[in-house]
Amino acid sequence: MTQKNTKPATTEEILKNAFLAAVAVADPQIIVPQYLAKIFPVGQEPTGRCLVVGAGKASASMASALEAYAKIHWPQVKLEGVVLTRYGHSSPTSHIRIVEAGHPVPDQAGMDGAKEVLSLAKQLQTGDVLIALVSGGGSSLLTLPQEGISIDDIRKTTEALLRSGAPIEEMNVVRKHLSAILGGNLARVAIAHGARVEALLISDVTGDSPADIASGPCAADYSTYLDALNILEKYQLDAKAIPVSVLNHLKQGLAGDIPETLKDADLINAQVANHVIATAYKSLEAAAEYVRTQGYESLVLGDTITGEAQDVGSEQAALARNHLANGIEKPLALISGGECTVTIPIGLKGRGGRCSEFLLSLFAASEGFPNLAALAADTDGIDGSEKNAGAWFSAEIRKDSELKGLNPETFLAAHDCYGFFAELGALVETGPTLTNVNDFRIILLDK
């Protein structure tokens, strides 16, 4: 009997498998049951009404995982509720209604679903349990404007913030102060009705603060109306870019005419807990563990790397160059996460997203290093304006670009990173992964 020879993985396979390892460790079907068992140990299952609400790119998958767990472990508990997710990110459920809506720019379907979430929360009574399933993308999906602000006003504000290059944390400070649900307002409603709140959070933000994940619908908020106004001023977003209703609302809040978002003092004696069940760093560690099995040393640079995608690409190219110049004893993988931004000049449409733009910048800045390969992709499976998760390249892809006469600098100037990698057949296409733990980047350096 002869043994089969196992071929070593190709560079492309290592890159893509590392990404898949990062995504797998944040799979709601695995992690939601684990945390439900901790939150509700045997004998302490929910009693009374069990309302399940939520929003985010991973929330529908979280809802289906919760239903599967409850069917086995809580057969006496009647589940009901509604969860909002991005179009194309649904997951099958029997008792919890799934609403698909617009992201990152909110639409009417999202507002109607958010209204239903708030209406259900207002029906809670003492002894009931509210389980909130929250993941990245929830800020846009739970866009229920405060009185006097229309969905169109929110849409225009979101579009202006996106174009300004404001990081997601700053965008969310503004959105919290315009929402009837975000910034802890969902928990505030449940607290007022005497209900217990258990929020399960999949983090896509740097720092993993519950207040920042989907703008913290069940968490105390550290920001203020003044912070929101300062952010608009910082990016020179005046009445030409931001609707007057939004500006007036924020100014009324600053004057004390409208209540602030939920604060720590509001949670004294309240039954509210936020559980971060998946993070970007755990995913980076999973990828690092995989590449070590392929003979690479791994260096995790952190999950908090932000900034303009093109700048970060250049910086990581310089870091890789230094490692190669100093000499590496064995192949090395540089792994990082965090959420970059892409500022689009007026008049340009652009194609792609922050992951592909980072990668194209890295590609351009690492010319002359054929022993460098890389991949960058969004763990939710969608990178920016197109349907790809991101892109990748190797020495072979670089040679192909030269043969085809593709100039990366030209594509960078046009913010058309999608077009560049599409020409080379180097897109990463997974479809919606039904989870979301921020961006994933890996650079492979061979001796």
Image: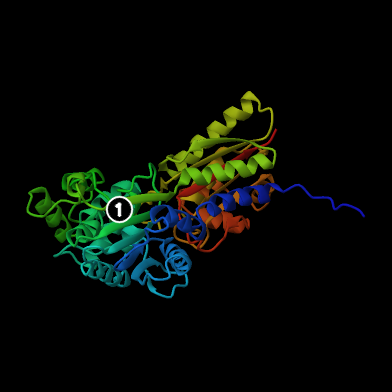
In-image side of 1 versus 211 (left or right): right
Residue 418, horizontal then vertical, whole percent: 52, 56
Secondary element under disc 1, as helix, strand or loop, is helix
Along the line of sight, the residue nearer the viewer: 369 or 35: 35
Report the residue marked by disc 1: 215
| Left or right of residue 208: residue 196 | left
Question: Is residue 165 at all visible to an observer of this figure?
Answer: no
Seen from the viewer's position, the closer of residues 96 and 300 is 96
> In the image as oriented, which residue stretches furthest toward the top?
326
Where residue 363 sits in the image (x, y, percent)? 57, 43
x, y percent for residue 397: 66, 49
- Count of numbered labels shown in the rendering: 1
- Up the image or down, 81 lies above or below 445; here it is below
Residue that extends furthest to the front in the rendered view of this protein: 43
Residue drawn at (22%, 48%) of the image: 232
Residue type highlighted by circle 1: Ser
| Residue shown at 20% from the left, 51% from the top | 262
